[in-house]
Amino acid sequence: MLNLSNLQPQAGSKKRKKRVGRGTSSGLGKTCGRGHKGQTSRSGGTKGSRFEGGQTPLYRRLPKRGFKNHPFRVVYQVFNLFELDKAKKATGLIKILGSGEVTGPVEVKAHKFSASAKKKIEAAGGKAINV
């Protein structure tokens, strides 16, 4: 019968950790299973996953296409109308989107507005001011 007092791991599931550099009689002393000399015997001795044996790597053989504008891209923090209270604490460039409703006349200052957001704010008697 199986209970907590006689539980044991499955046979072969627990292996001892390989302890290297603990004397020659251990079988993994001296060179610690790395062999003599050469690249792989040294620490950090691999070329990395992208190395292709000295051949020009794939990422350099493929043509570069398109225009990369990421250093100059403009990133806006996006808020919907139902999140206007969160937008009060926001820093950076802010864009207001039109999801949700405006309850009363509100003056909203932001860097950008979607057309639907501007329409809803002005319909409620408020102002959508571009900063």
Image (spheres, rainbow, N blue to C red):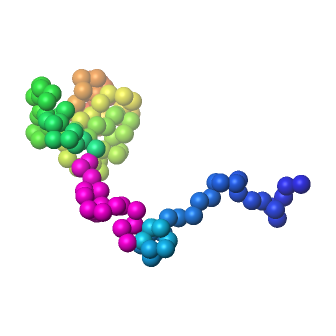
Q: Return the residue found at the far bottom.
A: 23
Q: Residue at x 45, y 76 (%)?
A: 23
Quarter location, residue 61? top left
User: Could you say where residue 72 lies in the image, as x and y percent from the top left?
Assistant: 10, 39
Above/below status of 28 relative to 72 = below
User: Could you say where residue 52 lies in the image, as x and y percent from the top left?
Assistant: 22, 39
Q: Residue at x 65, y 54 (%)?
A: 12
Q: Main secondary structure of the magenta part?
A: loop
Q: Residue at x 22, y 30 (%)?
A: 113
Give, as a single range, the part of the protein colored magenta: 30-48
- Res. 83 in view: yes
Quarter location, residue 94? top left
Viewer-proximal residue, 120 or 2?
2
Q: Residue at x 28, y 44 (%)?
A: 49
Membership of 14 in magenta stretch: no
Viewer-proximal residue, 19 or 111?
19
